[in-house]
Amino acid sequence: MPKRILTGTVTSDKNEQTVTVLVERRFKHPLLHKTIRSSKKYRAHDAKNEFKIGDQVRIQECAPISKTKRWEVVSA
């Protein structure tokens, strides 16, 4: 099964080798047909500490790295 890749914005880079990425998805409400914005935060592994707040990044699923990290940053 292929690994999922998501695109989002870095909201925090305070932790060592970790960034928090806000991923927003848009979908149409099934009954009201109104476009809804839903967002979720993921903690991703950033080995070189190269990404800063506000950067657009792509994250990919990986094996668990810590209690909360199951994603790694692929590229900007």
Image (cartoon, rainbow, N blue to C red):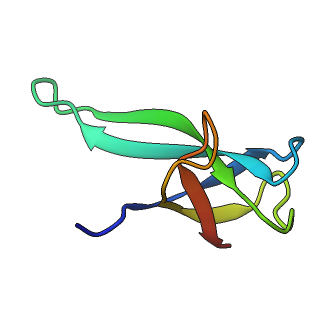
- Residue 44 % position (x, y): 64, 51
Q: Nearer the viewer, residue 36 or 58?
A: 58
Seen in the picture, residue 32 relative to 56 is either above or below; the reply is above
Q: Can you say which quadrant of the picture contains the N terminus?
A: bottom left
Is 1 placed left or right of 47 in the picture? left
Which residue is pictured at 75% across the width and 61% down the height?
46
Which residue is pictured at 81% across the width and 63% down the height?
51
Seen in the picture, residue 31 relative to 65 is either above or below; the reply is above
Quadrant of the rendered image containing residue 22: top right
Which residue is pictured at 20% across the width and 30% down the height?
29
- Residue 58 % position (x, y): 57, 66
Quadrant of the rendered image containing residue 67: top right
Is 35 placed left or right of 16 in the picture? left
- Residue 60 % position (x, y): 49, 63
Q: Can you say which quadrant of the picture contains the C terminus?
A: bottom right
Q: How many marks?
A: 0
Residue at the extreme bottom: 75
Q: Nearer the viewer, residue 6 or 17?
A: 17
